[in-house]
Image (cartoon, rainbow, N blue to C red):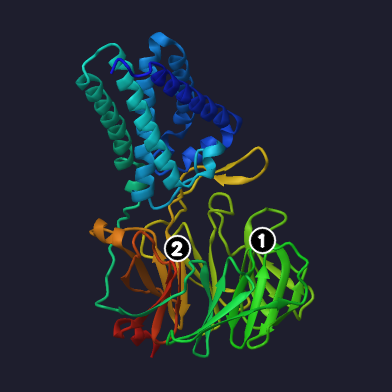
Amino acid sequence: MKKINPQIPVTIGYFFILLFCYAAVSKLLDFENFQLQLAQSPLLSAFAGFISYAVIIVELIISLLLCVPKTRIMGLYASLSLMSGFTIYIFLILNYSDFIPCSCGGILEKLGWTEHLIFNMICVALAAAGIILYEQRKEVRLIRPVLFCNTTIVISCAIIVILFSSSEYIIKKENNFTRRFLLHPVLEDKSLDLALNSYYFAGISNGEIYLGNITAPLLLTTIDTSLKETKAVKINLDTSEYRFRNIQLQVKDSSYYLYDGSVPIIYRGTLGNTIARTISYQDAFFTQLAILDSLHFIIRTQSSKTRQYTLAALDLLQNPKLQLHPSILEKQIDGVFDVDGKLISTPYNSEILYTYTYRNQILAMDKQLNLLRKMHTIDTTTVAKIQTRRLSDGTHKMSSPPLKVNGEMASHRNLLFIHSSLKGRHESSKMWKRASVVDIYRTDQQEYVGSFYINNKGKNVFSHMAIDDQYLYVLIENELKRYWLREPISKYFN
């Protein structure tokens, strides 16, 4: 062991000096955003203020320790401890967290979380190797540095695991409500490999399923409900010189619609015809759109006066075409994140539904946006549990992990299907790792019908769902799956 180049542990020390100095400086240069990223972490949100300063200080102190020969071994042990903590943190985020927060910034921000985990594991191995080689130069028995390295790694990982298990965010996801799981309400019937995971449901009409694609926004894919025949056509816009951000497709009856609310324009085309023509231009910017018919729409827009989200009716035959209804969405905190939700139309009774994302409320409105009913989901979150912060550039961001109540949803006839984000009382944690829960509600009155599970594909949950009289369709990764709706659900359609 004496023949080992004594410069190897020194070189490893220099590597960590560069790494920690770079990391600390990049955090300081964008400190406001770094602090917000920590605040959004499911592990560290309660301690974001302290940790944002502590991490930078610790990284700089370790760099100084590594610069001085007498304290280099302390710096290597500190490097091992810090990188072990970072490693187990990423492992827990990837495997046990319901969402993935932002990365740490700098050049490492270009790495994916899995690549970041591998990089950190290499750094742990380098730090351990540096310690062992450094101690071997002093003819210390190998067992002592190996034991100390293992102890350092275990203690660092244990601290992060304790933080995770006691996280306020994890604890508060268990609401004090009980679900009623229906007896075999859906049975998986058939699946189709779509080859891509970028599809979403544009609509179901006349025995055909229509899919849009976020990576090919002008592509309309048609699949028959037996999942046997597939065809795709490219839509041509009559005007396409605009700089779109996110074109969306919807199909209703015999027409399809394309829109991007960041550009105030709506196109309409007829199924079977690849030309989509402009029917609305510069009438309104919007973030969501629900189609009533070819001339009438409901949109969610942002008020130019209050900067808050509001619902509005867009009637292409009237003058003015846009009528705002600012009193429908009820502000609790900021009027943006706290009123976020999903807007959908229900052809069955010509009503509009708006379901809040961060609170347990469903709004039912008529075509003129008169509020008909306020209903609620079964959880106990009446006030949105979010914290927002205004940055120096005027933008608003979440400053802590939001408690998401309602996820993806779909409506058919008088039922609303909601992918729930909250676990109820007495529900199996193991089952929640293997499957996603869908809750069913009546839309014509306040009534919780029941719940059922949709199995995940590995670690991936379904992203979209659609329903007709016979089947529930879900998109999960690159698959379209069909589930047969059995009597506990189908009886509500009769």
Q: Are marks 2 and 1 in contact (CB under 8 Å)?
A: no
User: The N terminus lies in which quarter of the figure?
Assistant: top left
Which residue is located at x 24 percent, y 77 percent?
A: 183
Q: Residues within 10 Å of mark 2 (few under 14, many from 20)?
A: many
Q: Find disc 1 in the rendering and name its residue.
A: 245
- The answer to whether 191 is drawn above or below residue 138 in the figure is below
* Residue in front for this viewpoint, 330 or 190: 190
Q: Is 436 positioned to the left or the right of 391 in the image?
A: left
Disc 1 marks which amino acid? Arg
Q: Find disc 2 in the rendering and name its residue.
A: 407
Disc 2 marks which amino acid? Gly
Task: From the top left corner, tell me how far across and down residue 470 is, in percent.
Answer: 39, 87
* Quarter occupied by residue 315: bottom right
* Residue in front for this viewpoint, 178 or 84: 84
* Quarter occupied by residue 477: bottom left
Determine the secondary structure under disc 2. strand
Task: From the top left corner, tell me how far across and down residue 393 is, in percent.
Answer: 68, 40
- The answer to whether 213 is drawn above or below residue 95 in the figure is below
Determine the secondary structure under disc 1. loop
Task: From the top left corner, tell me how far across and down residue 308 is, in percent.
Answer: 64, 55
Which residue is located at x 32 percent, y 47 percent?
A: 171
* Quarter occupied by residue 237: bottom right
Residue furthest top in the image: 70
Task: From the top left corner, tell me how far across and down residue 433 is, in percent.
Answer: 30, 58
Q: Is residue 264 visible?
A: yes
Q: Is residue 177 visible?
A: no
Cα distance in 3D space between marks 2 and 1: 23 Å
- The answer to which of marks 2 and 1 sits earlier in the sequence is 1
* Residue in front for this viewpoint, 488 or 109: 109
